[in-house]
Amino acid sequence: MRRTVFEADHEAFRETVRAFIESEVVPEYDKWYADGIVPRDFYRKLGELGVFGIEVPTEYGGAGIDSFSFQAVLTEEIARAAVSFGGSSVHVSLCLPYLKALATEEQKQRWLPGFVSGDIMFAIAMTEPGTGSDLAGIRTTATLSEDGTHYVLNGAKTFITGGVHADRVIVCARTAPSLAEDRRYGLSLLVVDTSSPGYSVGRKLDKLGLRVSDTAELTFTDVEVPVEDLLGEEHCGFSYLGQNLPQERLSIAVGAYAQAKAAVRFAHQYTRDRVVFAKPVASFQNTKFELAACRAEVDAAEAVVDRALAAHDRGELTAADAASAKLFCTETASRVIDRCLQLHGGYGYITEYPIARLYADNRVNRIYGGTSEVMRMIIAKDMGL
């Protein structure tokens, strides 16, 4: 079926991105995969391509397009090729909304031109050792200096995507004690310069999947953060974090759907080429039925994604809508990719085959951005249960 969520401009962008991946990413990807990280200069190439500036206002060097659909196209093309752009998705999909909504004019002038060019890469640091979904339990502290010119940041963060290459990190820290009646009070967002004394990047975590996306531990020891780098109002950080969750979950839903679609493509191609008992694997009835069932599930996920993308661009995507899209697409993708790997036989377990990488990469979709269990709680609450 023809998709109606994308227009001619989106498809032209798709062609540009696909050609870029073929020429700039695919030839280098095995090395990136072995290294577990993309080269820092790759982000500047993405900046030159215009990927980072699509949703940035024109006065800061961007294209000024108020639509998430272009990022969806990018996500689909990355999955189609079974590659990764490292931590760049966090830079755009997670960090940019905070900068656009909360940064002062002076802050936007300082940060957004470099954001667009890839000279200033952003990451966001919320999760701490022992503090995942319960953000009110954050222990990292930011104490205002006696002269009121800076905060002194102390604490640690973990699972920070893009943390190795980041130039600025949006850190959620406690600037005041929580209240008995409100555990969420007292959290603030600080945009931390990673070259600051006392800022340290610890281990680059060795993950099951998403191996090219650098994920790091961060430590702050008496890091001085100028008050000019406070993002939004003091003590209001928790409410800010909740505002971007629908887009974050939508982006995960898009990625999961795109991975499932790519898996069907890879399995279709492999089973037509692979010969067993003097016949292509695709000629067996079981193979046909399995691929047909996977195709039907992908079609359903595509419909969910497209409806959610349209709602988001209209400003109508609710927290429950996003949770439903994420839950359905990530659970569907898990089933589809597993079945497509099975059709590869033993070769599906070898990481030089893209289906194996998709299998590993996909697993985290049901965890980050809110687990499937949390998504069910959100949906149930919306139902009045």
Image (cartoon, rainbow, N blue to C red):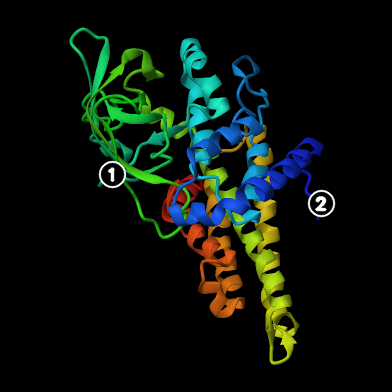
Kindly report the distance in space between the C-alpha atoms of the residues bearing marks 2 and 1. 44 Å
Q: Which mark is residue 2?
A: 2
- Asked if marks 2 and 1 touch (Cβ < 8 Å), the reply is no
Residue 239 lies, with reference to residue 147, above or below; the image says below
Mark 1 Cα-neighbour bin, 10 Å: few <14, some 14–19, many ≥20: some
User: Which residue reaches farthest bottom?
Assistant: 277
The one of 270 and 155 positioned closer to us in this rendering:
270
Image coordinates of residue 212 in percent, x first then y, are 48, 51
Q: Secondary structure at mark 1?
A: loop
Q: Which mark is residue 131?
A: 1
- The residue that appears at 73% across and 79% down in the rendered structure is 282
The one of 155 and 187 positioned closer to us in this rendering:
155
Amino acid tagged 2: Arg
Q: Secondary structure at mark 2?
A: loop
- The residue that appears at 33% across and 26% down in the rendered structure is 195
Image coordinates of residue 36 in percent, x first then y, are 44, 52
Q: Is residue 285 left or right of residue 179?
A: right
User: Which residue reaches farthest left?
Assistant: 146
- The residue that appears at 69% across and 92% down in the rendered structure is 277
Residue 189 visible in rendering: yes
Image coordinates of residue 320 in percent, x first then y, are 53, 44
